[in-house]
Amino acid sequence: MADKNTDLPYMLPTVEAFSKAVSKLGINEQQRIVFYDDGDSFLAPRGW
C-alpha cells in the first residue's frame, strides 16, 4: 500500500487510508502484527 497522491515511489499512505485498508483485512488495534523478510528487502523494517 502506498500514497497514490504522489509520483514518488514507496510513500506511506495517509493514516485514514491505511486504517481503512487494514480494517478491510480484519486487522484492528487489539491485534499484534509481525513484519519480517528474508534479509534482502527494505519494506519489513519500514512497517515497524
Image: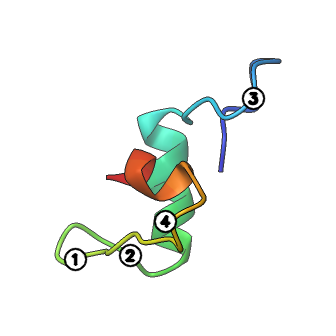
Please give the name of the residue rendered at 76% of the width and 32% of the height, measured from the top-left corner: 4
Identify the residue under disc 3. 9
The span from disc 1 to disc 2 (Cα, nearest Å) is 9 Å
Which residue is nearer to you in this view: 24 or 3? 3
Q: Earlier in the sequence, mark 1 or mark 4?
A: 4
Q: Earlier in the sequence, mark 1 or mark 2?
A: 2
Q: Amino acid at mark 4?
A: Val
Between disc 1 and disc 4, the foreground one is 1
- Mark 1: few/some/many CA within 10 Å (<14, 14-19, 20+): few
Q: Quadrant of residue 5?
A: top right
The span from disc 4 to disc 2 (Cα, nearest Å) is 5 Å
Q: Specify the label residue 22 is tagged with.
A: 4
Which residue is nearer to you in this view: 44 or 2? 44
- Mark 4: few/some/many CA within 10 Å (<14, 14-19, 20+): few
Identify the residue under disc 1. 32
Identify the residue under disc 2. 27
The span from disc 2 to disc 3 (Cα, nearest Å) is 25 Å
Q: Are marks 4 and 2 in contact (CB under 8 Å)?
A: yes
Q: Earlier in the sequence, mark 4 or mark 2?
A: 4
| Mark 3 secondary-structure assignment | loop
